[in-house]
Image (tube, rainbow, N blue to C red):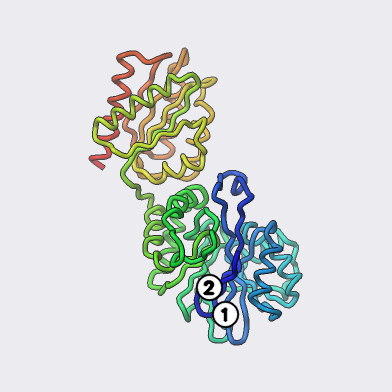
Amino acid sequence: MNVKEITEGVYYAGVNDRVTVLFEGLWPIPEGVSYNSYIVKGENATALIDTVRIDEVREFLSNISRIQDGRPIDYLVINHMEPDHSGSIPEVVRAYPDIKIVGNVQTIGMIKGFYHIFDDSRFLEVKDGEVLDLGGKTLKFYLTPMVHWPETMMTYLEENGTLFSGDAFGTFGALNGAVTDCEMETDRYFPEMYRYYANIVGKYGMFVQRALARLAGVDIKWICSTHGPVWHSRIAEVVDLVDRLSRYESEPGVVIVYGSMYGNTAEMAEEVARGLAEAGVTNIIMHDASHSSMSRMISDAYRYEGLVVGCATYSMRLFPPVEAFMNAMETREIKNKVFAAFGSFTWAKGAVGSRMDEYVARMGLDSAGYVVMKQTLDDESRAAARRLGTEVAARLTRK
């Protein structure tokens, strides 16, 4: 990655990862991901903001060296301790032995636990609202816990309105040459921002709202996240998107997620989709849970206002890929959806329905009903599946 001066005294030192297949061992990243790190140069001191995953440390240290040209780094500010951002801390300390690590009390505890750096004189503990003067460059710290770890904070450079936001406002996708949104086509990153938020941050909407409220009134001209482009020209869109997602606001559309062993439940899914279309729903997204990635299903379920889940009975339980999806929805405490379900069975009529009812009750979903089919579609079950689609469309109209 080319090093770049983003705005006066602020430099990009991050790296790309085009090798990792599954982010966090879970989420596909076919377009890669960037691990962003920044250097802020003041008149009296220089600060490095976050590090990168340890796999990329050689390039990372090279980037720092090119920016610094032999000059020291005085401070290492850690906004977020997840290892894709903190993993290179020990190597940075080895390269710059006089560096001070800046973080809040929880950050410092995690550094000791993860990296066995125990010398208290190495650390500068900061609290919410405190500042660090670099000489003509003032860093102000905003503690934003649970966005999405308990130690997370954001660092604001007062002189030129630059917010180093940690994982907030981040996205999957490597940076292809350019760094800021002013110098690249960024439309492709917005679907990946949906997916990143839903997969990584989604459970913590309440805490994201608190962070946004904490930053209200702060004059933000640049957002330097730990993943994805540096935002400048599209800040309003990015903040609005994260605000809506964290309030569980959805776009028009219905997602159908289904699991089918021999095609019968899949046929039901098609009938539900036809019912939706006949009722005027124009944006219908369908996922076969055995083939679609969990990442995409979660992202679409977050994005759209209707969710219909279909499931074959499997050993008196939900079909495993569908059960995994419903567990993911419950874990993320998904809200404000019109929900419906359909299922099939051969001899255990109540298994799917009762388990879906349990999810609906625990998650507080607005259920438009449940349709069950015995063995294969007939005229009655076909009509019932279409009516279910029609009822979901009607609920969306009334929402």
Task: Give the residue drawn at x 52%, y 20%.
Answer: 316
Q: How many numbered tags mark residues here? A: 2
Q: Which residue is mark 2?
A: 141
Q: CA distance from mark 1 to mark 2?
A: 8 Å
Q: Is residue 327 above or below residue 17?
A: above
Q: Indicate the position of residue 40 as horizontal and vertical percent values.
A: 57, 77
Q: Indicate the position of residue 330 as horizontal and vertical percent values.
A: 47, 40
Q: Which residue is mark 1?
A: 132
Instruction: Give the mark nearest the N terminus, 1 or 2.
Output: 1
Horizontal side of residue 172 vs 350, given as left or right: right
Q: Is residue 335 above or below residue 70?
A: above
The crowding category of the residue bearing disc 1, from other C-alpha atoms within 10 Å (few below 14, some 14 to 19, many at least 20), is some
Horizontal side of residue 350 vs 145, given as left or right: left
* Element carrying mark 1: strand
* Element carrying mark 2: strand
Q: Amino acid at mark 2?
A: Phe
Image quadrant in which the C terminus is located: top left
Task: Give the residue drawn at x 41%, y 31%.
Answer: 309
Residue 203 visible within the image: no
Q: Is residue 317 above or below residue 300?
A: above
- Do the residues bearing badges 1 and 2 touch, measured as CB atoms within 8 Å? yes
In which quadrant of the rendered view does residue 310 lie?
A: top left
Q: Amino acid at mark 1?
A: Leu
Q: Indicate the position of residue 46 as horizontal and vertical percent values.
A: 62, 79
Q: Indicate the position of residue 390 as horizontal and vertical percent values.
A: 26, 30
Horizontal side of residue 134 vs 170, given as left or right: right
Task: Give the residue drawn at x 53%, y 71%.
Answer: 155
Q: Nearer the viewer, residue 287 or 78?
A: 287
Residue 294 visible within the image: yes
Horizontal side of residue 312 vs 107, given as left or right: left
The crowding category of the residue bearing disc 2, from other C-alpha atoms within 10 Å (few below 14, some 14 to 19, many at least 20), is many
